[in-house]
Image: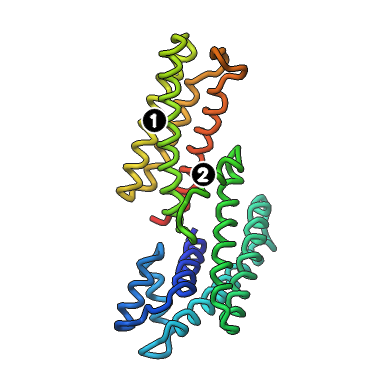
Amino acid sequence: MKMYRILLVFLSITLVYSVAEALLDGKTQQSVNVICKKTIDTKFCNEVFANNLTTSSPSKKDLLNVTVIEAERISANTYFFISTLLRDAGDERSGLQKCAEAYEIVNTAFTEGVSFFNQGLYGEILKLTEANTQQTVDAICKQTIDIKFCNGILAKNPVTSPTMQDLLKVTVTEAERISADTDSFIITTITNVGSGPGLQKCAEAYARVNASFTNAVSLFNNERYAEIIGLMDEVSYGVGICKTDFNVPGYNINPMIEKNRETNVLAAMEKIISHMVPS
């Protein structure tokens, strides 16, 4: 995940400079600190500037120039590295091939970023960061059982060029909300039509699921991302308790089938993105 993390840093830096108008009012290092704090790896971001700036008082364009050039260089090296591994790949060929295809797209995007910079088309660089964001979302959602639902959840993220923390935040927030709504639905249904054994099991299950999603929000707020992964096993276990082989009065199809599916997607999303968040 290290190279993916580096590329996200470059996207974040590029975005900052594409939309900034007046950033360098203070000393260079203070300005660099402001930029790097907006990325997911402050140390690496600082090193990019420290190792590549050739002037002690760089302009905004100088810093963006360093960013796009280094992004293109590292992306090209990564693509070459993957291509080299493919030559002798065995069982891992399928996974490496997907990485090669992904980095071919990324490499092209960063090369276009250099071209846009040279033409002074800084707004076009911003569009590239947005395109890469959608590719990241697609990569996450393709690993779930409902790509459309997953995309809909991540689309609620308010940040234009989100970090993995941003994507995880919207996921844990929406998971807690949807889980609470499901828990409320079950309780209301039991109140209105009575509690059969199937619905009662679902009530017990979602009390457990809801607690796990709430705990996940707390773990996120405390930056304990890795612990969210194990917590999602609790969610999956809870969903397994809620069987759907019973009728719910007023519904042709048991609504818990859909709610269980959405819950499983949310749990999978939290596990996938938690793995991608840098520690």
**Helix, strand or loop for disc 1:** helix
Asked if residue 15 lies left or right of residue 86, the reply is left
Residue drawn at x 67%, y 60% as measured from the top left? 101
Reading the image, the residue beneath label 1 is: 210
The picture quadrant where one finds residue 218 is top left
Verify CB contact (< 8 Å) between mark 2 and mark 1: no
**Residue 175 % position (x, y):** 44, 38
Display coloring: rainbow
In terms of depth relative to the viewer, which is nearer, 72 or 37?
Answer: 37
Q: Residues within 10 Å of mark 1 (few under 14, many from 20)?
A: many
Residue drawn at x 44%, y 20% as measured from the top left? 186
In terms of depth relative to the viewer, which is nearer, 63 or 180?
Answer: 180
**Helix, strand or loop for disc 2:** helix
**Residue 37 % position (x, y):** 35, 67
In terms of depth relative to the viewer, which is nearer, 44 or 139?
Answer: 139
Q: Residues within 10 Å of mark 2 (few under 14, many from 20)?
A: some
When the figure is inspected, residue 95 is found, relative to residue 38, above or below; the finding is above
Residue 80 visible in the snapshot: no
The numbered dot on residue 131 is none
When the figure is inspected, residue 197 is found, relative to residue 104, above or below; the finding is above
Real-space Cα separation, disc 2 to disc 1, in angstroms? 17 Å
Q: Amino acid at mark 2?
A: Ile
Residue drawn at x 36%, y 81% as measured from the top left? 24
Residue drawn at x 32%, y 80% as measured from the top left? 29
Reading the image, the residue beneath label 2 is: 153
**Residue 10 % position (x, y):** 48, 69
**Residue 131 % position (x, y):** 59, 62
- How many numbered callouts? 2
Q: Name the front one of labels 2 and 1.
A: 2
Residue 222 visible in the snapshot: yes
Q: Amino acid at mark 1?
A: Asn
Asked if residue 140 lies left or right of residue 234, the reply is right
